[in-house]
Image: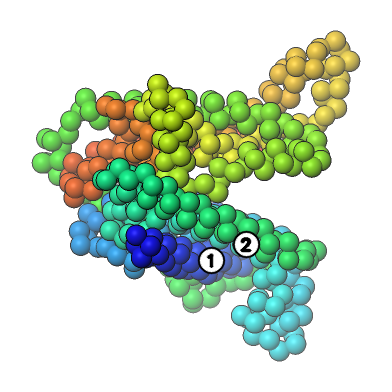
Amino acid sequence: MRQRVLQLTVNTVLLAAAVTLSCLVLGTVCAWILTRIRLPFQRTLLLVSALPLAVPSYLAAYGWLVWFPHLNGFWASWFVMTMVCTPYVTLPVAAALRGASADLESVARTLGRGPLRAFAAATWPQIRPAAIAGALLVCLYSLSDFGLVSMLRFQTLTWGINAAYGASFDRNQAALLALVLVVLALVVVAGERHSRRQVSSVPGRSTMPARAPGRTWPVYVTVLLAAPLAGVVVPVVGLLTRLLEAETLRAIDVPRLVEAIGATLGLALAAAVIAVLVALPIAALAARYRGRLVAVIEAVGFLGHALPGIVVGLSLVFFALAAVPMFYQTSLVLVFAYVVLFMPRAIGSVRSGIAAVPTSLGDVSRMLGLSPFQAWWRVTARLALPGIAIGALLVAISAMKELPATLLLRPTGISTLATELWSRTALFEFGAAAPYAAALVLVAMVPAVLLSGIRGTAREN
């Protein structure tokens, strides 16, 4: 038992560390190219570099298995997960580089340091907070991932939890493994906070102008497109190849597919609405007030960000069986799990939307005779609606793709697109899984398109 726990823990730590380090390096390099090199279609390349975020890790693993059915183990898991997670570092570091001061790096170059040493001495301290934040997301994602490592047959703690609970229904072993996983996640979060406190801010005055790439532009473009190609194009092409096969088209169970789509949309919509309703008061407090109590309330709201989905699912299984058995394996518990896991994504967007509304507008409404609630609802809530909608869409997208908690908590007889995809790929039925994978991509595209439209409208206003 102890040896098994130790082996799963070592596998998990090694995979998370390797993926985090490789994403940190590749993401920083991509961000530097996007901000320091003048390339054609610069904005398009930035959007393309973010595409892997829209593809669930298990869907990317499925696409690679279509092409290479014998792909498995540590290196396969490391490669696919790195390609999927790199944008978590690229996007914040690129934003930080745009505001970083170029003066210190110029001075370092004049003192005889090479480009790499000058970057490390002058620019890296300025972008380090953004890089640490992105690396934290990658590490937590790697620790909590279940679908990818299961499909690629690399045994980690999430795999062990599911095996202990699903195969032998060993609650004690599952709880022990879940506890180890939570401890690892908390250690990562604590380490990130400690590193953030040690960073000293460097005032930015002027950004370094982008330089022409010369004859090396194909190298830069190749580096930028590595993650989108491996994380999006290869899986999607593999998916379309299987989907267009005659045998797959004839074998599609249309009623079951429609039922899975309906369940996915219904659960995601319910989770988005409830998560926003719960996030609203927390976000309003954080946007309008300061103090230790407000900081504690906001921190509690963000706790779900550090909890792996499989741990939340397992905890709610134990709680439902012990306290409210009538709700065990009902949609209510599953939606509650989605709210716990994804409400932090709503809090950030809603808080930003409310903070952007001037408090003077509420004061004027109060002077015109409106009650505090009426003033908030008619003025603040309406003006903050884009931020609220963005938070709801982020929750909906995340709920559609969520796998481990859904496997543990879904009601009997109800399956989502994610669980249908996983159950078929687990049996190497790639052809039968193709329709569910395609439907998941199409369904997830709807809130993603709406999200882009709302962000574009917000920027125009």
- Residue 374 image position (x, y, % from top left): 75, 14
- Residue 252 image position (x, y, % from top left): 17, 34
- Judging depth in this view, the residue of 271 and 79 nearest the camera is 271
Q: Residue at x 67, y 58 (%)?
A: 193
- Amino acid under label 1? Leu
Residue 50 visible from this viewpoint:
no
- Amino acid under label 2? Gly
Give the mark nearer the N terminus: 2 vs 1: 1
Q: Residue at x 36, y 38 (%)?
A: 408
In this view, 277 is above or below 67 = above
Picture colour scheme:
rainbow
**Residue hosting label 1:** 24
Q: Quadrant of residue 125?
A: bottom right
SS under mark 1: helix
Q: Residue at x 40, y 25 (%)?
A: 325
**Residue hosting label 2:** 191
Q: Which quadrant is home to the N terminus? A: bottom left
In this view, 111 is above or below 388 = below
Residue 358 visible from this viewpoint:
yes
Farthest residue to the bottom: give it: 112
